[in-house]
Image (cartoon, grey):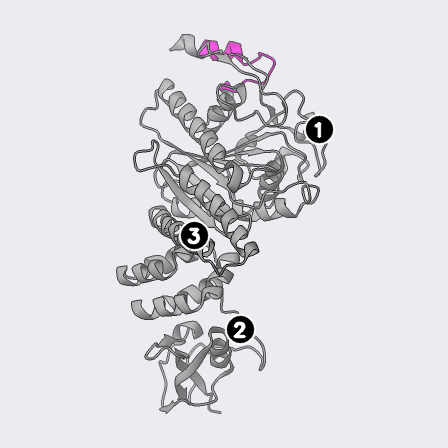
Amino acid sequence: MPVHWGLAWLQPRGTPELLFEIAAVLSTSVAGATEVSVMHNVSHSVVETQAVAAELDLSVAVVINITEAPPTPFVGPEPGASVDLTGARLLHQLGLLSAPDVAAFLTANPDTVRSLLANPPAARDVTIWWSGMDLARRSAVAAASPELVGNLEGIPYVTRDRANRVFLAESIRELTAVTVNPTTGRTVAENAKRQLTMLDSIETALGTNQSQPRRSLLSLDVEGQGRAAIVLGDLRTADYVTYLVPGMFVTIENQMGDWVDAAARLYEEQSGWLELFGEQESTVATVAWIGYHTPNLTNVGGIGNAQEGSVWLTESVIGLQSLRTAGEPYVTVVAHSYGSTAALLALAENRFQIDALALVGSPGSPAKSVTDLSVRNGNVWVGEAAWDPIPNSAYFGSDPGSASYGAHSLGVGGGVDGITRELLLASTGHNEYFSAGTESMRNFALIGIGRGQFVTDGNGAASASTLAVVAER
C-alpha cells in the first residue's frame, strides 16, 4: 500500500521567502521515491509537519508527497500529540536557515530563546550546531541574540564573552531608557534602577582591557536576582581551573566585585605556587561563579536553590570538559556554605567528574561519604572555622566534616606556612574563608593545582612533610 511521506518547506508567518527545511528533522532520505507531486499552500500534511509548524508559528509553504516509503521511515507521533521542538533539534533546524532568515526568526521569537536557555541542549550538541554553520550565519545569530550565544555551553568561550558583553551593554541601555522616561511608573522605574545596580556591578567587576589577569563574562542572566560568572584567566588553555561557588546572601548586586576579588586572590596564589614548584609554564583560571540564585533568609531553609545551583554548575563543568576533550584541565570546585550543598548535589548525580573538591562552612551533604561523590581519588577537603555556627549542623544531610564521611581535614585556623615560612591568618566565623593571607586561601590554592599533599590539616602534621620537600630542593 502506498505510504505518503511529508517533506516540507516552512515559512514563518509574516516573514517572506524564509524557508525552513523539515527534511532534516525527519532525518530521512527521499531515495527510492517513485513519484513526486508538489502542492502549494496545502492545508494538510503529515502530523510531524503540522506539529512543527504550530510549534514555531510557521505556515506550510510546500509539501512533497512521496508515494513510496523511504528505506527508514519516520514514525510520527499520534494525531494531536505535541512535537518537542526544543534543544538540539531546534538548534539543528535554525542551522538550516540562511543568515538573514535565522536573524529574523530569533529577533521575532525572544520567548523561544529564553525557553531554550532555560532547558539547554547538551554542550556537545551545541558545539556540533555552532561548528556546522558558516561565519555569516554565526555572526547573524550572535547579532540577533547575543543572550543565546553568550549562555549556551558548547560555544567557544571568546565568542560567549563577546556576546555577553554586548548583551550586558544592551540591557544597561534599555534599563537606562526606562528610568529616564518621564512616563515610566514609579514601581517600574525603581525595579529598573535595581536591575541597573546589579548590571553595573558586573560591568565594574569585569575591569578594563588592561586588567590582569584578563577577565571574561562566562554567563549572564539579567532577570530578577540575576546570575553571572566571571572568569579570570583563559578557560581555553588553562591547565588548572577552579570554580568558586558561593552560599547565602552572595548576590550579584552586592557581592559580584567581592567574589571576583576572591577569585583574583586565588589566581595569584595558584600562579605563585606553580612558580615555586617549577611549573612556570602551567596556567590557571579561576571562575567567580554566581551561577544560581543564592538563598536569603526567606528560603535558605529549603533545598530548592541548591538543586538549581547543582543543575547550572553541572552544565558549566560539562561544558568546559566538552570543549577541552583534547586536553581536559584539572578541575576543582571550592564551595562555601549553602553553595557546598549545591556542589555536593551536583557531584552526587555522577553526570561528570572533577579532580578535587574543597568545602568550607558546609550545612550538610546529600551524599553519605566521599565515595558517593564524583571526585577522583577521594580528593575532598573540608574546613570549619572557629565560631562558625553552620558546620556540624548536618541540616541538609550528612556532615561532611565528620570522620565517617572520609574527607581530608582543611586547616583554616592560621599559623606559619611550612614551605614559605609566611604567617597565615586565621578564619573566624562564617565569612572569612576567602580573606587575603588566610590559611584557607593557601590551602584552596594548593588543592586547585593538584598539590593536596601540602595542604595543612590544622594540627601541624603537614609541616614536617612540606619542610622535607623544600630541603630536597
Residue 154 appears in the rendering: no
- Secondary structure of the residue carrying tag 3 is helix
Q: Residue 176, image x and y in percent?
A: 43, 52
- Which residue type does callout 3 highlight? Thr
If the image is split into quadrants, where does the C terminus sit?
top left
Indicate the amino acid at tag 1.
Answer: Asn
Per the rendered image, the range of residues in magenta is: 454-469
Q: How many marks?
A: 3
Q: Which residue is mark 2?
A: 83
- Asked if residue 457 lies in the magenta stretch, the reply is yes
Instruction: Tell me which residue sits at (55%, 48%) in the image.
Output: 225
What percent of the width, then of the height, locates residue 103? 35, 66
Q: Compared with residue 95, is residue 199 higher up or lower down, i.e. above or below?
A: above
Q: Toward which corner of the image does residue 407 lie, by quadrant?
A: top right
Residue 392, disc: 1
Task: Looking at the image, tell me whether mark 2 or mark 3 is earlier in sequence order.
Answer: 2
Q: In the displayed structure, does residue 451 sit left or right of residue 360?
A: left
The mark closer to the camera, 1 or 3, is 3
Q: Earlier in the sequence, mark 1 or mark 2?
A: 2
Q: What residue sits right under mark 3 in the picture? A: 176
